[in-house]
Amino acid sequence: MKRILLAALGLGGMAGIMAPVYAQSSVTLYGIVDAGVGYASGQRTANSKGGVGAPINYTNGSVWGFASGTWSGDRWGLKGSEDLGGGNSAIFQLENGFNIGNGTSGQGGRQFGRQSWMGLQSASLGKLTFGRQYDPIVDYVGPISAGTFVTGMGAHPGDIDNQDNQSRVNNSVKWASPNYAGFQFGAIYGFGGQPGSVKNQNTWGFGGSYASGPFAVAVGYLQATNAYGTSSSTWSGSYDGTFSSSINEGFASAASQRIVSAAGSYTFGATQVGIQYGNVQYTPGTLSTFASSFTFNTIGTSIAYQFTPALRLAAAYNYTQGSDVKGSGGPKYHTVNFASYYALSKRTSLYGLVGYQKASGNTLDTFGNVVSATASVGDVGNGISSATATQTFVRVGVRQTF
């Protein structure tokens, strides 16, 4: 019996020696659920189809309702890594966005519409990833934009400069550098995939940031090209675009759009102040409903104060001005937002938000008609377009992470 036991132990030891050694890996399930109620002083309802020379007739009415994903978009996801040795790893992230109120998927019904990518990471060379991803404006400018403290309701109108990450880049390759003494930078390219053209539907951009102690600054650039057929136009296959509000729906037929975005922040004690800038240019093509390039310029500022470890209050203001519309002047938007955030625990918090916007001047509708500019507080995910020049938004909710 003793000899049998020793033999068994010997075989077991040999099996341990001969067993393959697997790289260490991990997969994490995570998510955010966010729900509440909200009020908007005005929401437009179309009473006619409209057309060239005949703008859509809208009525306006206030609305109370359920609010999903106001502070943070509802999501669940999986992210993982495998250690390849030598400071290298294989990584991936799959993230689904959804509406907690009705259970439907967000981002146009995509299964992993928020993010879906995989790639390789090196401690010395950075990260190279492939898939549906955020652009460098989101990566570098977004973390110090006003939306960080006053949510998407405080985004520049319609989130036209994507500081609040309403758009992603499909079929993309992205590289992000390691942190070099506070400096980080990166670039992205999204393939258009249109036969016979490398340029059509492609997207490319770059950006960077610097942080040192209480100071941070970031800048980003993005350009996306439309896809054109013989008789109609659709937006880029590699970039979502944000043309769902009255702010810029009249420029969805652009041949291309270019975004320049920048932000800076400074923290002293319990106070953080910030300044933001966005420049968006829409260039027309042969099938566009407008004939001259159109530009939005936005300047904004924000302040947040941590009253207690649990309570934070914040406020933001931004001013957006558009260029001339067919000789009739351009649109202007003044937006102010207030936010309160109270942490009940490490994972659960309560929040309250108030936003107000005043529009003036003229803009274009989807048919290229000159119309009066109307208000639309926040990004296209949180906001709804009004039929009038002013709009007030109020929302309260609860947010939980896991």
Image (cartoon, rainbow, N blue to C red):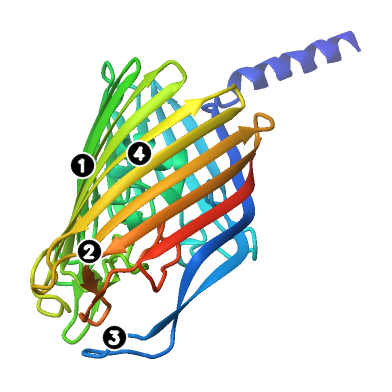
Across and down, in percent, residue 94 comes to 50, 48
What residue did someone put label 4 on?
A: 145
Give the alpha-carbon distance from disc 3 to disc 4, as whole Å: 35 Å
Q: For the residue carrying disc 1, how many other residues have a C-alpha within 10 Å: few (<14), some (14-19), or many (20+)?
A: many
Q: Which mark is residue 260?
A: none
Query: Which of pointers 1 and 2 indicates the residue nearer the eye?
Result: 2
Give the alpha-carbon distance from disc 4 to disc 2, as whole Å: 23 Å
Q: Can residue 222 be seen in this snapshot?
A: no
Callout 3, which amino acid? Pro
What residue did someone put label 1 on?
A: 206
Q: Nearer the viewer, residue 325 or 12?
A: 325
Residue 367 vertical position relative to residue 279 in the rendered view, above or below: below
Residues marked 4 and 1 touching at CB (< 8 Å): no
Q: Nearer the viewer, residue 221 or 126?
A: 221
Q: Secondary structure at mark 2?
A: loop
Q: Which mark is residue 331?
A: 2
Residue 4 vertical position relative to residue 257 in the rendered view, above or below: above
Quick one: quadrant of the N terminus? Answer: top right
Q: For the residue carrying disc 4, how many other residues have a C-alpha within 10 Å: few (<14), some (14-19), or many (20+)?
A: many
Q: Which mark is residue 55?
A: 3
Query: Which of pointers 4 and 1 indicates the residue nearer the eye?
Result: 4
